[in-house]
Amino acid sequence: MLFACSKEDAEKNKSETVSQNTKKTETKTPPQKETEKLQKWYYFVKNNKGNLEIKQTSSINSIPKTDFLPWTESLRLVSVGLMYEKPILLINRGGIITVTDIKKNAEFESSEIFTTKTIDGFYKTDLGVLIRAYTDIIFSELPKNLNQSQNYCVYRYNSLNKKLIPIIDTESLKLAKKAQLTKLVYGKNWLASFKTDQNNKVDFNYIEFSNFEKLKNGEFSQMSHEEFMDKTKTEKLISIDIKDFKKNIIENKHKNIRLEVFKKEASNKIVYIKKETKHTLNIDDELEDSTQDNDASLSEEEKEITATACEFNTSVDNKYKKAILFSNGEFLYSKNGKKWNKDTLPKLPKNFVYTYFVIYKGKIWAAWEEQNFFQVGRTGLLEKKLK
């Protein structure tokens, strides 16, 4: 059968054909590329100069394997600081970086203190923002002949040049040269414990002081082990209001949770513990290991889980006022401080957990690490655009 058409109809058909072909040739952004726009995976390495390097990868599964090290010796995020306009991150064996410094192949010079000691913090004090430095004598050896620079245990962070200034050494406290500052917390006063291992003997010293200026001047009091343990019970160290976070933890389905809270006005992180079953790991340990199933009879809700909570400065275009991140990726957030919303971060491989996080200008930077009991393998950050 033959069909006849006018020139006008032919032009119309041609136009429609071109339009259809154009639509067919339009390419949509592949889902993987779209995901990469919304989230980025980074991992930490030490380069041949001994400096911290942050490398970017397309997937956490493509990150090269690394040796497992004790958590005190490994390259891992150990704390966050919310006292500045831009959040800062404390990376053990690496350095202190600002959240906006995180990018592909970024390199940061690791000062001697980060290459030789274990670092913890941040502490907001009368002398500024401080960190503590110590050697875990179980996993590391102290130099045979310690000089004064190696005796410093407290450093002040200079946010302008990102340098550390030593301010407290053990000898000025009339302690042994080998004494290590193993714990520093704030309740009604500052409380510190020192461990000394020498001459095949281990000794402990416990002190209390009201502020660091007085500590520098030798104004502190000694206390017994029993008194120190009593004063450092987690419930006695909650010095600021965290009831909003506690409510979410109490109502959460998980029965055993160790929560660490970071707030701008807090002197240090606040720890809150929810413990509803007896068959759990030691929930008071410094490093919790959420990957170890110590009792196969435990349900998922009974197994111990860790979480981090942060309250952010909303004056810097940060729409997220409060948030809680669980080690399994569960994520709660509040934009107005009242209504809480639920979300989930990307699932991690087996034996990987989320640890600390910050939010800045609509993005979350969540630390993750590979755990094996007290050892840590691969570590890094997830950067993700929030809803």
Image: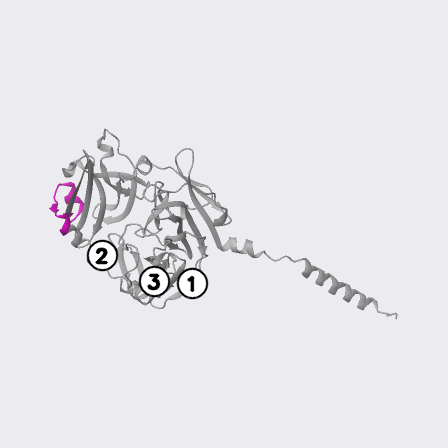
Mark found first going from the N terminus, 1 or 3? 3
Type of the residue with mark 3 = Glu
Q: Quadrant of the N terminus?
A: bottom right
Place of residue 364 in the rendered image (x, y in percent of width and height, measured from the top left): 41, 55
* Residue, disc 3: 302
Dot in front, 3 or 2: 3
- Disc 1 and disc 3: Cα gap in Å? 21 Å
Residue range in magenta is 208-226
**Does the stretch in magenta take in 212?**
yes
Labelled pair 1, 3 in contact (Cβ < 8 Å): no
Place of residue 97 in the rendered image (x, y in percent of width and height, measured from the top left): 36, 44
Q: Quadrant of the C terminus?
A: bottom left
Type of the residue with mark 2 = Thr
- Disc 3 and disc 2: Cα gap in Å? 21 Å
Type of the residue with mark 1 = Asp
* Residue, disc 2: 234
Place of residue 180 in the rendered image (x, y in percent of width and height, measured from the top left): 22, 40
Q: For residue 131, which quarter of the picture?
A: top left
Mark found first going from the N terminus, 1 or 2? 2
Q: Secondary structure at mark 2?
A: helix
* Residue, disc 1: 343
Dot in front, 1 or 3: 3
Of residue 128 and residue 268, the one placed in the foreground of this image is 268
Residue at x 55%, y 54% (from the top left corner):
32
| Neighbourhood count class around disc 1 (C-alpha, 10 Å): few under 14, some 14–19, many 20 upward | few
Labelled pair 3, 2 in contact (Cβ < 8 Å): no
